[in-house]
């Protein structure tokens, strides 16, 4: 009988129960890491990929069991990519469909490093899976029809380069002789399944805040998470000319960039304003509003960037 995966309904149950995990962002409750795994399963892919290459669908089709050891980024890291990879690994380790999982495996060719597997795992049919993953936050600084327009907050990376690297190099590694040899040295068979997992946000100039552009590069998932970016001298617009009675601002520091903020703001708006005014680089900000019951919820998010940031006309 063929194996039939069971899809978890994450609205009704939590795949991992964490207890008192550490490090724990100060605004989060003790089930924060359960929420992180729910976030992992519920958030859309940034890019269009079809099954079986779609890593998110691969994760959603797995069943999990609670782990005795709670997730804890080790060592405690402010690097969002490392934090994300460790969260993915912890989820994979809880999957009952997986017999063995390995991560960050370097691949050598004649003693020269030619790449690294993010994840390899064996399923219960003893078939090997190879997955590459990334969490990315890119700001659109040009036509949204061009992947090169999407750049990192510090402009050191672009969606064009990252997507090319993931699709043409990283995921191809398990089809190369050196990659197959690395698998064999682990006692793993030749990988039969490849998966790409890329999540995060794309941010558009402030005047495009509410919706993403209709015209996108075809590789971009139209249902991706999106936000805004705004030049520093226009930051007063963040709390003015809106339909909410009161908006508060919450600065987000790495690695706490994933979950929506659903707690009261940690500081008053004037303190946030002071930090934004003195900033010399992009800062991620969540805008918060209270619902009818007085609970704080994230309305949207975006980057406040220095006035000399970017090549696009001022929004």
Image: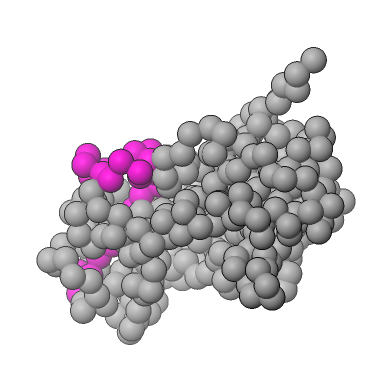
Quadrant position of residue 191: top right
Count of marks overlaid on the render: 0
Residue farthest to the left, as pictured: 313
Give the quarter of the image for residue 30. Answer: bottom right
Q: 190 left or right of 159?
A: right
Most distant residue in the top direction: 1
The range drawn in magenta is 211-234
Q: Residue at x 54, y 39 (%)?
A: 53
Give x and y (percent) for residue 155: 34, 72
Is residue 308 located in the magenta-colored stretch of the structure? no
Q: Nearer the viewer, residue 154 or 185?
A: 185
Q: Give coordinates of residue 308: x percent, y percent.
A: 21, 79
Q: Nearer the viewer, residue 310 or 172?
A: 172
Colour setup of the view: one colour
> Looking at the image, can residue 157 be seen?
yes
Q: Nearer the viewer, residue 100 or 256?
A: 100
Residue shown at 29% from the left, 72% from the top: 305
* Front-lying residue, 35 or 180: 180
Q: Quick check: 247 left or right of 205?
A: right
Instruction: Give the left or right position of residue 93, taking residue 244 as reference.
Output: right
The C terminus, quarter of image: bottom left
> Residue 210's spot in the image, x, y percent?
26, 45
Question: Quadrant location of the N terminus?
Answer: top right
Q: Specify the quadrant of the image occupied by residue 158.
A: bottom left
Q: Residue at x 81, y 56 (%)?
A: 186
> Is residue 226 part of the magenta span, yes or no?
yes
Q: Position of residue 238 (x, y in %)?
A: 27, 61
Residue found 53% across the figure and 69% down from its top = 254
Question: Is residue 260 at all visible to an observer of this figure?
Answer: no
Image side of residue 305 versus residue 107, left or right: left
């Amino acid at each position: 009988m063929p194996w039939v995966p069971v899809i978890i309904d994450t609205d009704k149950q939590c795949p991992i129960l964490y207890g008192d995990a550490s490090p724990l962002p100060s605004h989060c409750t003790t089930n924060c890491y359960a929420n992180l795994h729910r976030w992992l399963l519920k958030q859309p892919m940034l890019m269009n990929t079809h099954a079986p290459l779609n890593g998110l669908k691969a994760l959603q089709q797995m069943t999990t069991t609670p782990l005795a050891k709670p997730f804890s980024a080790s060592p405690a890291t402010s690097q969002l990519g490392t934090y994300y990879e460790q969260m993915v690994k912890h989820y994979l380790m809880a999957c009952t469909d997986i017999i063995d999982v390995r991560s960050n495996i370097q691949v050598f060719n004649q003693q020269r490093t030619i790449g690294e597997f993010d994840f390899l795992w064996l399923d219960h049919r003893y078939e090997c899976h190879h997955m590459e993953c990334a969490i990315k936050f890119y700001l659109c600084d040009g036509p949204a029809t061009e992947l090169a327009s999407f750049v990192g907050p510090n402009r050191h990376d672009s969606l064009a380069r990252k997507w090319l690297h993931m699709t043409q190099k990283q995921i191809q590694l398990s089809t190369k002789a050196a990659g197959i040899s690395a698998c064999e040295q682990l006692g793993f068979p030749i990988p039969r399944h490849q998966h790409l997992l890329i999540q995060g946000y794309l941010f558009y100039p402030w005047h495009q805040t509410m919706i993403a552009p209709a015209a996108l590069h075809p590789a971009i998932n139209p249902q991706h998470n999106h936000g805004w970016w705004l030049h520093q001298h226009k930051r007063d617009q963040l709390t003015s000319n809106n339909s909410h009675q009161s908006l508060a601002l919450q600065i987000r520091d790495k690695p706490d960039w994933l979950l929506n903020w659903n707690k009261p703001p940690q500081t008053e708006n004037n303190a946030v304003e002071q930090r934004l005014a003195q900033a010399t680089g992009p800062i991620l900000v969540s805008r918060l509003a209270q619902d009818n019951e007085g609970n704080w919820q994230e309305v949207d998010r975006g980057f406040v960037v220095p006035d000399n940031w970017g090549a696009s006309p001022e929004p």
